Image: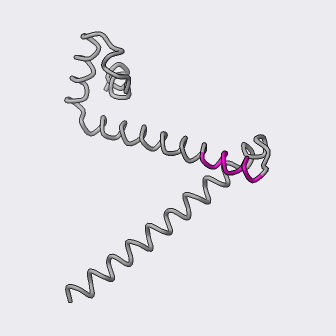
Amino acid sequence: MDYRTERLLNDFRDADELDADEVRARLQARSEHPDLYLAAQERRASQERDEQDRAEALDSWLRAGGDPKGFDKEWSAISTEAKRIQMIEREHAARESFERYGRENF
């Protein structure tokens, strides 16, 4: 895949912001590479969630009397710990679901 196609797959501007040729090219790239387009959408959604989580954490940090510079220094650790907790919760939910399935079907 060339650079232009990759750029088209990662272009999430509104169609109103593009001319007709750009819209056609973007739709063609997406139809030719649906798996890559889906991956690009997932990356974008993940980045948006990370930005929202950071903004919420910063707001909580400031309300608790924290310093914005201190938050920037601690964000990596805060983010890593939050993601670790989310993974543990998901793992726990998956185990419960598996156990429930086992009890119901055996």
Q: Which residues are magenta?
A: 56-64
The residue drawn where x is 38% and y is 42% is 42
Q: Residue at x 25, y 25 (%)?
A: 29
Is residue 66 highlighted in magenta?
no
Residue that appears at 67% across and 54% down: 77
Q: Residue at x 30, y 10 (%)?
A: 19
Q: Is residue 46 left or right of 39 when viewed as pictured? A: right
Colour scheme of the rendered structure: one colour
User: From what the image shows, is residue 43 above or below residue 24?
Assistant: below
Quarter assignment of residue 4: top left
Question: From the viewer's perspective, is residue 85 above or below residue 53?
Answer: below
- Please state the horizontal and vertical placement of residue 37, each as a whole percent of the image: 30, 35
Main SS class of the magenta portion in the image? helix
Could you say where residue 49 lies in the image, as x and y percent from the top left?
49, 45
Q: Is residue 11 left or right of residue 51?
A: left
Q: Position of residue 36 (x, y in %)?
A: 30, 36
The C terminus: image quadrant: bottom left
Give coordinates of residue 11: x percent, y percent. Answer: 37, 25
Q: Camera-side residue: 93 or 4? A: 93
When asked about the image quadrant of residue 95, the answer is bottom left
- Check the image and report above or below for 36 versus 100: above
Q: Is residue 74 left or right of residue 30?
A: right
Residue 26, placed above or below residue 85: above
**Residue 84 horizontal side relative to residue 14, left or right:** right
